[in-house]
Image: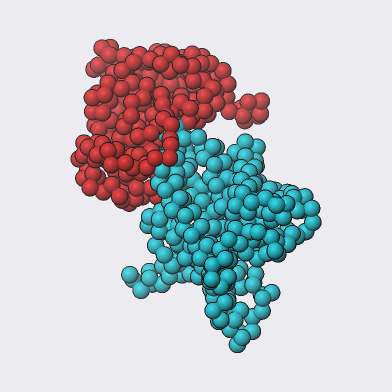
Chain colours: A cyan, B red
């Protein structure tokens, strides 16, 4: 694998670490299986790209993307807690609706960002190749988000959110509004996913309405894979596991696609992803069965 | 002071399975009183506690706690007034949070939760102090996940969590029923001690007539969603299980057909 391919995998891995953080919040903390992300990822891309093309500051455009994603998450959560629609179904409804919304925002299926000023533009002035500087910028963003998330989950509100997912009846008895916690958590989760979409569009140079397909599976692969590799004893470790999982997943994919003798091509990506996720779910169980058989 | 007036709860209203769980139940509990509530299966004990805590909506009637009408408030909005220990030891605590985090949740019951650190040092000192009171050595295990503890230990902590911060009423929902006799006795003694020390107003639902007479100062029996009898000290003192049965027959004109109540 070439250095550029390696750094490219790291770069995409860092972006998907943000998706994994979001999915950790919805799937693990809130126990809310959320497919909205397949819509909020391209939503972040669409909002940021459209605003950048219209001449807005790229940081402002990225911030607007986060807000848009947050609103999408709130709508899913609201359908679940107020309209009593099954959580999985509520998220599918939002995801489908977002496809139309994204087309409306962009006015066409894709928006190119070539030659536009993105959040990466100022860093191009440094005398470092682009394939080094982009992952570096993303690493800083991901590190800031990771620390913020850890602090949040250890705060009083964050603890209330964790209790909401783990034991809602007990949470209510302690005076926690589980509805508000689910809405807030889903907003943060999809805000993070939209941020990932915005960064992805800016580093790839385009936003496309189909770019969200399979984001949920890649994000889950990162969360589950990370959990299989890193201990999740503390909140910090659990979130770090998402980051490790996301990067290693991308490296594994890059390796598989680069190893010619396997004969895999780019279009096999989704098949490989699905196989990896299935493996990551089954392997830990398989490991404990083996241990039992050996009498450990 | 708890004022419950003509409380009515009907499940499946207007359907063939309509079930009148509470029929015009009224009860007044003065501040600092410890009431035990008994009744056979389906008498409405659990429905009564769930209505008080806000977990189920009432069809009509009124619940006033400390001069605040809470009849239509959701559970989380009356948590500052009502604290609760569940029957299931697993229900009152979060198993994948640490002991320290569970106590921190209870420490903020009914209060605003902000973005400051949940397990501050000064809180932890309070937690250690209270855990020491249990005499289970749990003060050295603050970082352990709740799921590592036994049912009895978890129930003791649930009790501690419910009384960590003051409340107007403590609801105990057969909280010793799922424990082995020795542990049940320990938790019951602990309950009595904590209620006595803090002069709490408490309602304890129990399935055992013996237990209902042994603790507290007043016993209320529910039957078919109503109060069958209501007896307080000093008359209650010295009563035995057969006396309660006689009292029930005298008040209701029927005999009780639930062996569980007599045996346990």
Q: Position of residue B48 (x, y in %)?
A: 46, 25
Q: Observer-nearest residue: B150 or B137?
A: B137
Q: Quadrant of residue B262?
A: top left
Q: Quadrant of the N terminus of chain A?
A: bottom right
User: How many badges with numbers are in the image?
Assistant: 0
Residue furthest right in the image: A108
Q: In this view of the protein, can residue A90 be seen by the observer?
A: yes
Q: Observer-nearest residue: A21 or B97?
A: A21
Q: Position of residue A11 (x, y in %)?
A: 55, 67
| Residue at point 45%, 21% (across, down) | B223
Q: Quadrant of residue B116?
A: top left
Left or right: residue A107 compared with residue A57 = right
Q: Quadrant of residue A114?
A: bottom right
Q: Position of residue A267 (x, y in %)?
A: 69, 74
Q: Observer-nearest residue: A194 or A3?
A: A3
| Residue at point 53%, 45% (across, down) | A185
Q: Observer-nearest residue: A159 or B12?
A: A159
Q: Position of residue A105 (x, y in %)?
A: 74, 50
| Residue at point 40%, 13% (across, down) | B28
| Residue at point 65%, 69% (across, down) | A270
Q: In this view of the protein, can residue A217 be seen by the observer?
A: no
Q: Quadrant of the C terminus of chain A?
A: bottom left
């Amino acid at each position: 694998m070439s250095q550029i391919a390696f750094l490219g995998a790291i770069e995409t891995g860092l972006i998907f670490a943000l998706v994994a953080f979001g999915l950790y919040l919805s799937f693990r903390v809130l126990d809310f299986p959320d497919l909205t992300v397949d819509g909020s990822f391209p939503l972040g891309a669409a909002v940021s790209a459209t605003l950048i093309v219209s001449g807005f500051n790229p940081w402002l455009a990225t911030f607007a993307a986060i807000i848009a994603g947050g609103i999408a998450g709130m709508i899913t959560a609201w359908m679940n807690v107020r309209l009593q629609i099954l959580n999985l179904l509520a998220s599918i409804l939002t995801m489908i609706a977002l496809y139309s919304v994204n087309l409306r925002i962009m006015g066409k299926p894709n928006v190119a960002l070539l030659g536009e000023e993105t959040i990466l533009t100022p860093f191009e002035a440094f005398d470092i190749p682009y394939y080094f500087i982009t992952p570096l910028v993303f690493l800083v963003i991901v590190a800031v988000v990771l620390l913020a998330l850890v602090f949040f989950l250890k705060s009083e509100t964050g603890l209330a959110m964790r209790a909401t997912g783990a034991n809602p009846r007990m949470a209510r008895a302690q005076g926690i509004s589980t509805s508000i916690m689910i809405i807030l958590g889903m907003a943060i989760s999809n805000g993070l996913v939209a941020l990932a979409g915005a960064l992805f569009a800016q580093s790839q140079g385009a936003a496309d309405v189909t770019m969200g397909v399979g984001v949920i599976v890649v994000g889950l692969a990162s969360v589950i894979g990370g959990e299989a590799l890193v201990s999740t004893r503390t909140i910090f470790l659990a979130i770090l596991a998402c980051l490790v999982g996301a990067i290693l997943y991308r490296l594994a994919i890059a390796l598989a696609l680069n190893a010619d003798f396997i004969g895999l091509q780019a279009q096999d990506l989704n098949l490989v992803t699905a196989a990896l996720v299935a493996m990551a779910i089954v392997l830990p169980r398989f490991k404990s069965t083996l241990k039992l058989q050996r009498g450990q | 002071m708890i004022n419950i007036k003509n409380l009515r709860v009907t499940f499946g209203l207007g359907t063939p399975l309509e079930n009148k769980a509470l029929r015009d139940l009224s009860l007044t509990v003065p501040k600092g009183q410890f009431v035990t509530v008994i009744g056979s299966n389906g008498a409405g004990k659990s429905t009564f506690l769930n209505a008080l805590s806000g977990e189920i909506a009432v069809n009509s009637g009124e619940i006033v706690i400390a001069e605040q009408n809470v009849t239509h408030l959701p559970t989380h909005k009356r948590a500052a007034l009502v604290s609760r220990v569940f029957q299931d030891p697993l229900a009152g605590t979060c198993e994948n949070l640490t002991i320290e985090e569970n106590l921190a949740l209870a420490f903020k019951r009914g209060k605003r939760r902000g973005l400051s650190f949940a397990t501050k040092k000064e809180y932890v000192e309070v937690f250690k102090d209270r855990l020491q009171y249990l005499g289970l050595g749990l003060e050295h295990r603050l970082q352990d996940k709740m799921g590592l503890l036994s049912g009895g230990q978890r129930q003791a902590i649930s009790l501690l969590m419910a009384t960590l911060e003051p409340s107007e009423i403590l609801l105990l929902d057969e909280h010793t029923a799922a424990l082995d006799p020795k542990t049940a006795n320990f938790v019951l003694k602990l309950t009595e001690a904590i209620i006595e020390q803090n002069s709490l107003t408490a309602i304890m639902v129990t399935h055992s007539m013996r237990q209902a007479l042994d603790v507290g100062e007043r016993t209320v029996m529910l039957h078919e969603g109503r109060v069958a009898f209501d007896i307080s000290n000093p008359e209650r003192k010295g009563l035995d299980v057969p006396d309660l049965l006689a009292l029930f027959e005298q008040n209701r004109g029927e005999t009780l057909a639930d062996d569980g109540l007599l045996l346990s």
